[in-house]
């Protein structure tokens, strides 16, 4: 139980375009999901907390207009990187809060902006 | 604000030997949760072990055990009988009680290499 999926697993896009990453809780409902960014050999940096039916809460320094988060259902949260640039290239990880309040992590999405 | 410090960027251990990864944290709260996560080359985060601060007994999960020293704010992970599959990046993490939200505060991580 408590499986989280992400789609796509990797994506390459051109500079200036937008890309959407999906995070799904497959066997449980998650009112809260989290989005992280991770650079190689570094720790996970929390970008935002996504709450179903309400606006996401962004961490300090994260541009909310650039990283759009939508949590429209109890099993799906999406992160859209708008007008992507090479510096947005990174590994993005989502997690979903289970009924036991623990976070269950997705497998991550590698974004490359050319 | 809470902080988590992992002072060992990299560690190496011989297969079948024991290794200890260090973690210290800073908090003014008395009740909280501590975790060790493993991130193998696949980059999937895997929960290794969980400790509740109000429990004095150190958590164990098979070959993985912790040394939780609440007064010293220390939470080290011991891996016994190390296996090649233990090679990964290990993160120590802190979480407040549920009513204060579910954010995890991660340390910088320790890369563990296992030699055969």
Image (cartoon, coloured by chain):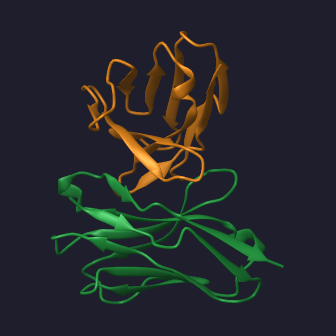
Chain colours: A orange, B green
Q: Quadrant of the C terminus of chain A?
A: top right
Name the residue located 56 percent from the left edge and 55 percent from the top edge: B45
Q: Nearer the viewer, residue B116 or A8?
A: B116
Rendered location of residue B67, percent (x, y): 42, 87
Q: Residue furthest right?
A: B116
Q: Nearer the viewer, residue A22 or A112?
A: A112
Instruction: Decide: is B84 above or below B64.
Output: above
Instruction: Decide: is A107 above or below B85.
Output: above
Whether residue A30 is visible here, answered yes or no, is: no
Asked if residue A45 lies left or right of residue B13, the reply is left
Instruction: Decide: is B69 above or below B109.
Output: below
Name the residue located 24 percent from the left edge and 80 percent from the top edge: B54
Name the residue located 38 percent from the left edge and 33 percent from the top edge: A74
Rendered location of residue A75, percent (x, y): 44, 33
Name the residue located 35 percent from the left edge and 66 percent from the top edge: B4
Q: Nearer the viewer, residue A41 or B94?
A: A41
Instruction: Decide: is B105 above or below A37.
Output: below
Rendered location of residue B36, percent (x, y): 48, 69
Figure quadrant of residue A113: top right
Figure quadrant of residue B84: bottom right
Q: Residue furthest top?
A: A16
Q: Nearer the viewer, residue A35 or A62?
A: A62
Q: What count of labels does the image hold?
A: 0
Whether residue B109 is visible here, answered yes or no, is: yes
Rendered location of residue B61, percent (x, y): 54, 80
Asked if residue B21 lies left or right of residue B94, the reply is right
């Amino acid at each position: 139980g408590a499986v989280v999926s992400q789609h796509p697993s990797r994506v390459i896009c051109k500079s200036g375009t937008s890309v959407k990453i999906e995070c799904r809780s497959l066997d449980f409902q998650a009112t809260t999901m989290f989005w992280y960014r991770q650079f190689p050999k570094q720790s996970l940096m929390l970008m935002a907390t996504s709450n179903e039916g309400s606006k996401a809460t962004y961490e300090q320094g994260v541009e909310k207009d650039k990283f759009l988060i939508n949590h429209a259902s109890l099993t799906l949260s999406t992160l859209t990187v708008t007008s992507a640039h090479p510096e947005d290239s990174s590994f993005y990880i989502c997690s979903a809060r289970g009924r036991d309040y623990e976070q269950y992590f997705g497998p991550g999405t590698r974004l490359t902006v050319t | 604000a809470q902080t988590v410090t992992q002072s060992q960027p990299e560690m190496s251990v011989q297969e079948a030997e024991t290794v200890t990864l260090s973690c210290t944290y800073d908090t003014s709260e008395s009740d909280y949760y501590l975790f060790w996560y493993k991130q193998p080359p696949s980059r999937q985060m895997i929960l290794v072990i969980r400790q509740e601060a109000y429990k004095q007994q150190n958590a164990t999960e098979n070959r993985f055990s912790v040394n939780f020293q609440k007064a010293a704010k220390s939470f080290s992970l011991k891996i016994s009988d190390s296996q090649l599959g233990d090679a990964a990046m290990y993160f120590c993490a802190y979480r407040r009680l549920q009513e204060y939200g579910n954010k995890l505060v991660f340390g910088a991580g320790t890369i563990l290499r296992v030699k055969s």
